[in-house]
Structures are given as structure tokens and as C-alpha cells.
Image: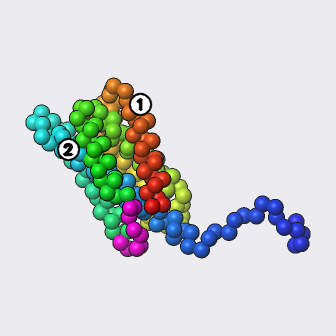
Amino acid sequence: MSETETDPHPTPTPKPGSEARRKAEMLRVDHAGEYGAVQIYKGQRAVFDKLPNKARMSALLKEMEEGEQHHLATFDKLLTETGTRPTVFAPLWNVAGFALGAGTALMGEKAAMACTSAVEEVIEQHYGQQAEEIGDSDPALREMIEEFREDEIAHKDTALDEGAEETPGYGFMKAVIQAGCHLAIKVSEKV
């Protein structure tokens, strides 16, 4: 192409601050996801903690919740350090997460584990996409996200080992929960 010709398909020039904006979106959505995950585990434990024959399940959920609490504290710190605001939907994710956790726990241990496996699968896939997108632009953030992704995979595997797929209507339940998670991701990134 000569100097006087113009490219009919020019490569778009990145907007100023777009990398910073994208990082803020990532942090906001990851914070929201960890916040929601903590609330789900709290809702599940609110049911199982009250049942004497569910002490083992309650302890398992507490252990997973503590991992999510660590993730949430890390994102709390990163939001503060970067001046990124959390999603305005945090109060909704608080109620929705707790209700989802309690509701599935009321359906039984396997249903609670079905919820866990569905949510953790979406989160681990989301973290995988983020790590790929970050690439070499922020190695520390990528490493942290990859570490958290491994934790989410472990939670999903635990849920599957606990019989998540044996839940009546598992496929439908998984699809509905995951659709909700994907919607929450899209909304939390931007708002």
C-alpha cells in the first residue's frame, strides 16, 4: 500500500487509559465474584450449622469459605490500592448469594454441592480467560489470578467428589446457576 492509500480496515488505536479501565473492570468483577461466593457459603452454612448430623458438611463448607474470604480480602486491598470502586450491585449479590446458598442447602447436601460446582466452574473459567488476557502485561496480577483459579478448581472438584452430579435435576440446576453467574459477571464489570 502506498503512502497516499488508506487502509480500509485500520487497526483501532487503543483509547487512553483503556488498559487501566480494563484492569479496574477485572478487579471489580473478581471482587464481586468472591463476595458472592462468600455469601453462598455463608448461606449454606446457616442451614447446615443448625443440623447436628451435618457437622462434616458444615466444616467442609467453612474451609472453602475461608479460601474465598482470603480471595475477597485480597481484592478488597487491590480495590483500595487502585482506587477502583466495587460494583454498585454488592448489596444485591449479598442477598442473592446468601439466598442461593441457603436455598440449595435446604434441598440437601448434594444440591449444595451442585451449586458449589456450578459457581466454581464459572469462576475458574473466568479466571482462566483473565489470566490469558493479562498475559505478560501484569505478571503479579496474572500469577495471583492463576493461584486463585487453582483454589476454585479444587472447590469444584471437592463438590463433584461430594456427589454434586447426583442431585436430581443437576443439569438444569447447573445451567440456571451458571446463567446467573454469567449475568452477574457482565453487570459487575461495568457497574
User: Where residue 158 sits: x, y (%)?
Assistant: 31, 39
Check if residue 81 falls in the magenta segment: yes
Instruction: Name the disc covering residue 45, or none.
Output: 2
The residue lying at 37 percent from left, 45 percent from top is 120
Q: Which residues are magenta?
A: 80-88
* Residues packed near mark 2 inside 10 Å, few (<14), some (14 to 19) or many (20 plus): many
Instruction: Name the disc covering residue 70, or none.
Output: none
The residue that mark 1 highlights is 172
- Quadrant assignment, res 27: bottom left
Find out whether the residues at labels 2 and 1 contact each other: C-beta distance under 8 Å: no
Does residue 43 appear in this view?
A: yes
The residue lying at 30 percent from left, 42 percent from top is 100
- Quadrant assignment, res 16: bottom right
Vertical comparison of 95 with 107: above or below: below
Left or right placement of residue 65 versus residue 124 in this view: left
Earlier-in-chain disc, 2 versus 1: 2
The foreground one among 180 and 147 is: 180
Identify the amino acid type marked 1.
Phe
Check if residue 122 falls in the magenta segment: no
| SS category of the residue bearing label 1 | helix
